[in-house]
Image (cartoon, rainbow, N blue to C red):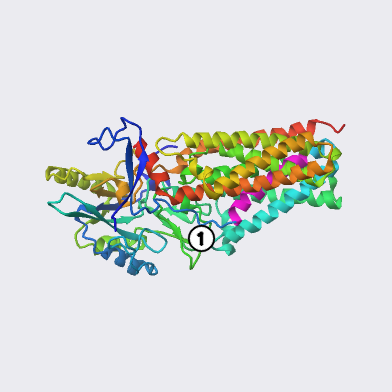
Amino acid sequence: MSISVDPAARAGHLGHPPRVGFFTDTSVCIGCKACEVACKEWNAVPEDGLSLSGMSYDNTVGLGASTWRHVAFIEQPADPARGVRWLMSSDVCKHCTEAACLDVCPTGALFRTEFGTVVVQDDVCNGCGYCVPACPFGVIARREEDGQAHKCTLCYDRLGAGLEPACAKACPTKSIQFGPLDELRERARLRVGELHAAGQDQARLYLDDTADGIGGGGAFFLLLDEPEVYGLPPDPVVATRDLPGMWKHVAIAAAGLAATAVALGLGRRR
Amino acid sequence: MRPQVTVPVRRRAGQRRRAERPMVPDAEFTSYYGRPVIKEPVWRVPDVPGYLFLGGLAGASSVLAAGSHLSGYRELARVAKVGALGAISLSAVALVHDLGRPGRFGNMLRVFKPSSPMSVGSWLLAGYGPVAGAAAVSEVTGILPAAGTAATLGAGLLGPAIATYTAALICDTALPAWHAGYREMPYVFAGSAASAAGGLGLLATRPADARPARDLAVFGAAVELIAKRQLVDRLARTEGQNLAEPYETGTTGAILRLAEILTAGALAGAVLGRRSRAVSALAGASLVAASAMTRFGIFEAGMASARNPKYTIVPQRRRS
């Protein structure tokens, strides 16, 4: 499958605006959850996690149909002198360059916007649920109440009005940065350099590489540990990359079955 | 409360990672509180595994119907045509019932997307259903026999696609136990479908009238047994993590093993007991049941591989 770094153009948006996204710099996240709240308020997303989970300060536990920003809290025993290392990270839909949810959606409810983001159309989705297991990050989910799939829209309505997404607007430390993706990638590389120079050897970018298994994320991250520590897959690959191979084997198997019909038909009744 | 769940994983000596402890044979994988990385499907049981079975039964029954129609096994052709219509009608009910918004099932035909096996399948079903229906109605009522023959052949052509596309449907996901088996799954599904359709024919016709059903059943059961063994072998060889585990352990493992034993037994019964109505019928019923159990087992194995983060994380960690 050909890989284009310009998904909006690939989807037929001619003369589209630059691709935008999120750079989430977890090194400055303070776990305030303003992003979770702002997202819910702006997008009128129902409540789904006010209880205690036993997972540090995490109440929402993971992304889902009604949690479009999720702040993860990880308490790591560090060296005795410095005590516990407390990692915080605001997770979100990755708006993949090669998006599995979008590929497999049978109704066209999921679509690529002119900004290069991936959005569900609420008036089209019939709740088939195929996008749910397709996503290599476990982002999109079906909401019990309305039977439809929901996820982050990267505030499509706000983008149209020239505003930044609600979560980025609300973030008090600029851990969530919004902007043209090229610019964000440049900024992220500088930030990693700064952190390395300051002795933070563990700092690394996640999903910033267009050569990765999803063609790079429209939302990417600066992490301070391995991705799986934050509940992220270390090397996700969009399932659709193997679809030509799947269709090939389906075609051979189907042809074999059809040949059987012919064989059965040739043997005249004795 | 421990901040992270770490589980020991067997790791080959000399493998990269944790360079400061090169001699430790068992290493660990880390996850976020043991939570799954991916989401398991919201597809309900019995709707979706039932559809995997019924779609296979319908598609392969149409294959059998076309074959026996041409070779003059009219009794068997009638059984297969009616069986195909029955199975595909139940399938449609199961599929619509499983939608979050059943009233919007028509949106399945809003677009055609080759990148979505479900879209391809919807269009296949939209073409196959009416043709299989016409074949059955013409057979039973005797109306428009020429059109009935054409419909029988048409359904026989589309049937194999109906029986196998579902393999791509489940494998084109992030579920490790399904996706990693995409090379073998279509053959497992084709074999399982053929053995179910042959089994139905054996069950419902006298042995003298059932030769094509027996041939299809024997062929299908053999293909299913071999392909499933190859599927499990490949998954067991996955770097770092045995992805065959969900197929071999717990209730799912027991169901799949029982299905294998039933299939093998029925295979022997169908061949050795080909003159006995009772043995043939028992073999046929066993094949139908085994096919259903195989689909339910494969469905559950995929779900289990989504629930435990090790199946997602460890193979990715190994290749990254």
From the viewer's perspective, tell me whether residue A146 is left or right of residue B24: right
Q: Which residue is nearer to you in this view: A122 or A214?
A: A214
B196 shown above or below B108? above
Find the magenta span and give its range.
B46-66
Name the amino acid type tagged 1.
Answer: Val
Q: What is the quadrant of the N terminus of chain A in the image?
A: top left
Place residue B28 in its image quadrant: top left
Q: What is the quadrant of the C terminus of chain A in the image?
A: top right
A229 shown above or below A269? below
- The residue indicated by pointer 1 is A124
Residue B192: % across, % down: 65, 41
Residue A257 visible, this orientation: no
Residue B171: % across, % down: 52, 43
Q: From the image, give the main secondary structure of the stretch colored magenta.
A: helix
Q: What residue is rendered at 84% in x and 37% in y? A: B275
Q: Which residue is nearer to you in this view: B274 or A245?
A: B274
From the viewer's perspective, tell me whether residue B314 is left or right of residue A248: left
Residue B136: % across, % down: 78, 50
